[in-house]
Image (spheres, rainbow, N blue to C red):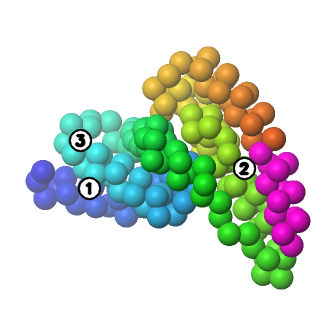
């Protein structure tokens, strides 16, 4: 890569790093893993930087890299075992406001949703993508996004009820 390309990449990285990291966190529920996933996505982008002609599609490309990395990682047996067992520490009622408890419940609830459904929910409702863009990011059909959204919302509703009960009983 020439110096101009490196400069463009560095500017894009600086501008989008935190947004990509947040998306990765919402997908995996762990800031350390989110850092790793964001780094994986940016490394993949760096490798393809010269070949990407449509600079307007960079966000979609990086988002797709993150989603794929999360889903691929969730398929590894060692990760599944660890992921199921990983429950965040519960905040005490004295330390946090109700809004923080609600956000924590959302993160806990998302962790209990299967990875593919979680990816659809994060892309659709937290990243604000429509069905077509989510399907493109996930590399699947729009019908799959719709069905995974319905199943994911049902699983999240169930998980949120349990997560809120757990968090409230701890306070």
The Cα atoms of the two marked residues, 3 and 2, are separated by 35 Å
Question: Nearer the viewer's eye, disc 1 or disc 2?
Answer: 2
The Cα atoms of the two marked residues, 1 and 3, are separated by 13 Å
Please tell me whether residue 132 is drawn above or below residue 111 in the rendered image.
above
Q: Main secondary structure of the magenta part?
A: helix
- Of residues 85 and 151, the one drawn nearer to the viewer in this rendering: 85
- Of residues 75 and 106, the one drawn nearer to the viewer in this rendering: 75
In the figure, residue 22 lies in which quadrant? Answer: bottom right
Is 101 inside the magenta-drawn segment?
Answer: no
Question: Nearer the viewer's eye, disc 3 or disc 2?
Answer: 2
Q: Residue at x 53, y 48 (%)?
A: 81
Q: Residue at x 74, y 60 (%)?
A: 103
Q: Residue at x 85, y 48 (%)?
A: 161
Determine which residue is flagged by label 2.
109
Please tell me whether residue 105 is drawn above or below residue 90 in the rendered image.
above
Of the numbered discs 1 and 2, the one sitting upstream in the chain is: 1
Determine which residue is flagged by label 3.
48
Please tell me whether residue 96 is drawn above or below residue 82 in the rendered image.
below
In the picture as drawn, the residue positioned furthest to the left comes out as: 2
Determine which residue is flagged by label 1.
8
Q: Is residue 9 left or right of residue 29?
A: left
Label 1–label 3 contact, CB within 8 A: no
Q: Position of residue 160 (x, y in %)?
A: 80, 49
Q: Position of residue 26 (x, y in %)?
A: 59, 52
Q: Position of residue 42 (x, y in %)?
A: 33, 52
The C terminus lies in quadrant: bottom right
Of the numbered discs 1 and 3, the one sitting upstream in the chain is: 1
- Name the element at disc 1: helix
Does residue 70 appear anywhere in the picture?
no
Q: Which residues are magenta?
A: 159-171
């Amino acid at each position: 890569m020439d110096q101009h390309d490196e400069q463009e990449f560095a500017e894009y990285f600086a501008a989008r790093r935190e947004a990509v990291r947040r998306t990765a966190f919402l997908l995996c529920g762990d800031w350390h893993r989110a850092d790793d996933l964001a780094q994986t996505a940016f490394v993949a982008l760096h490798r393809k930087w010269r070949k990407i002609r449509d600079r307007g599609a960079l966000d979609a490309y990086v988002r797709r890299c993150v989603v794929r990395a999360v889903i691929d990682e969730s398929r590894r047996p060692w990760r599944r075992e660890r992921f199921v067992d990983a429950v965040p520490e519960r905040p005490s009622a004295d330390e946090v406001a109700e809004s923080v408890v609600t956000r924590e419940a959302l993160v806990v609830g998302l962790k209990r949703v299967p990875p593919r459904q979680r990816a659809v929910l994060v892309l659709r409702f937290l990243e604000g993508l429509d069905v077509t863009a989510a399907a493109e990011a996930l590399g699947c059909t729009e019908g799959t996004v719709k069905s995974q959204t319905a199943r994911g919302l049902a699983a999240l509703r169930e998980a949120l009820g349990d997560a809120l009960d757990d968090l409230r009983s701890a306070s």
